[in-house]
Amino acid sequence: MKNRTIIIGLLMASVLMGQSKISTADGLKEKVIAAYKTTEIARAKAFLQTEPITVTAAYCERSAGGLHDFYSEGDYWWPDPNDPKAPYIQRDGQTNPGNFTAHRHAMVRLSEIVATLSSAWLLTGDQIYVDKAMEHLNAWFVDTATLMNPNMLYAQAIWGRHTGRGIGLIDAYHFVEVAHSIKILEEKGGISKEQTAPIKEWFSAFLKWMTTHQYGIDEMNTKNNHAVCWMATASSMAILTQNEEVIQLCKERFKNIALPEQMEKDGSFPKELARTKPYGYSLFNIDAFCNVARILSAGDDNLFEHKTPNGVSLKTSIEFIYPFIKDKGKWPYAKDIYIWEKWPVCHPALLFCGLAYNNPEYIDMYLKLPLYPIDKEVIRNLPVRHPVIWLID
C-alpha cells in the first residue's frame, strides 16, 4: 500500500510538472502575441489604404526577361571603373547602390502587407483585413495583367556575365510568410478553397520550377545559407500545396546534408564566419535553419530536437550565437564590413528556439530587440518577422 501511494504521488507530480511545462510554453507564446497585438492591428489598418504593386510596375532595361518576370541584380557586382561598358566586377560584401531593386522591394512589400493583414485578422476576426490581403494576392498570382511569372530565371543577374543565376532564388525567401499566411487564412476559414485554388496553382508551378530547373538544383546544392533558404522557401510552398515529395526532400536535406555539413561541433557555421559579414551571415543562417524547422516539424518529427551523428543540433547553434546576441561586443571574429551596427534585431531563431526549448531568456531577448527594424537591408535579411501568424493555433 505504501509503495502504491508513492507511485501515485510520483505520477501526480509528473503530471503537474507536465502541466507546468505546457503552461509555461503557452505563457511564452501569449507574451509574444501580446507584445505585437496593438502595433500589428495599427499597421494593418494603415495597409488597408494600399494598392498592389507587382513586378509589372517597374521594368529594367538590363533585364533579359519580360514585363512579368522578376528581375534583380547581384548585390556585390559593380561597373568596372576602368571600362564602364565591360562586364561588372565583384566586391564581396559591398552592395552596389546602382542595382535594380524595384522587384525585390515589391516582393518584400507584399510579404509585409499580407503577413500583417493576416495577423490582424487572427487577432480581431475582422474580414476587412482578409479582403485587402486577397486583393494583393490576386494581383501577384492570379490577375493576368499584373501577375509575376512563376520562376526566377532573371534573378541576381550580372551585367555582361549572366542573365540570371541559381543564387537569385534567395530573393524568393520573402514568399515564405506569404505562403504561410495563405495556409493559415484557408485553414481557419478566412478564405475559401475556391479563392486559394488559383493561388496554390501558382505556387505549385513555382515549386516545380525551383525543384527541376538547373538554377533551383544549383541553389539547393550550395554549401552555405543559400541551401537553407532554398529549403525554407520550398518547404513553405510544399506545405501550402501539400506536396509530400518536396516536404520529405526538405526534411532529408535538413537532417542529412545541411545541418551536418554546415554546422561545426561548437554550433558555428564556418562558411558564414569566413565571409566579410560573419556576424550578420551567422545570424541569417541560424534564422533560416530555425525557419525550416518551424515549417517542417510535425508530430514526433521535431527538427529542433534532431541531432547529427556528431551530436549537434539547432540547440547547439543557438547556444553558440546567443551570447553574442546578448552582447555583440564579445563577438570574437571580424566585424561585418556592412551594417554591423544594425544587428541584432528580432531574430526568429530566438523566437522559435525560445518556444521549442521552453527558454524564457530567448523570448525576453527577442522582445527586447527592435521588433520593427526599418533598415531595408536588415528587413531583406529578415523574411520571417510576423510572429502572430506562426503562434496563433
Image: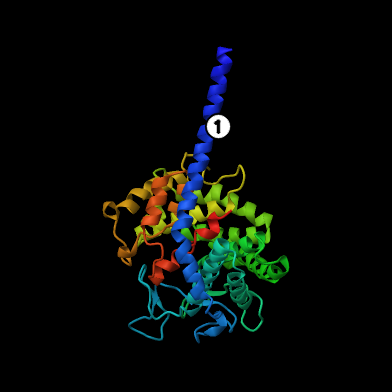
Mark 1 = which residue? 15
Q: Looking at the picture, which amino acid does disc 1 mark?
A: Val
Eyeballing the image, is 143 above or below 238? below
Question: Viewed as shown, does residue 21 lie left or right of 149?
Answer: left
x then y, percent, for residue 239: 63, 58
Give the residue at x 66% y 76%. Answer: 142
The quarter of the picture where residue 15 lies is: top right
x then y, percent, for residue 22: 52, 41
Eyeballing the image, is 7 above or below 239? above
Return the residue nearer the eye: 2 or 60. 2
Give the residue at x 58% y 70%. Answer: 129
Disc 1 crowd, CA 10 A, few/some/many (<14, 14-19, 20+): few
Q: Is residue 128 visible?
A: yes
Q: Quick one: which residue is furthest to the right in this view?
A: 194
Question: Viewed as shown, does residue 209 lie left or right of 388?
Answer: right
x then y, percent, for residue 213: 62, 67
* Callout 1 secondary element: helix
Q: Quick one: which residue is furthest to the top in this view?
A: 1
Return the residue nearer the eye: 30 or 77. 30
Question: Viewed as shown, does residue 332 lie left or right of 19?
Answer: left
x then y, percent, for residue 5: 56, 17
Quarter in which the N terminus is drawn: top right
Give the residue at x 47% y 39%. Answer: 310
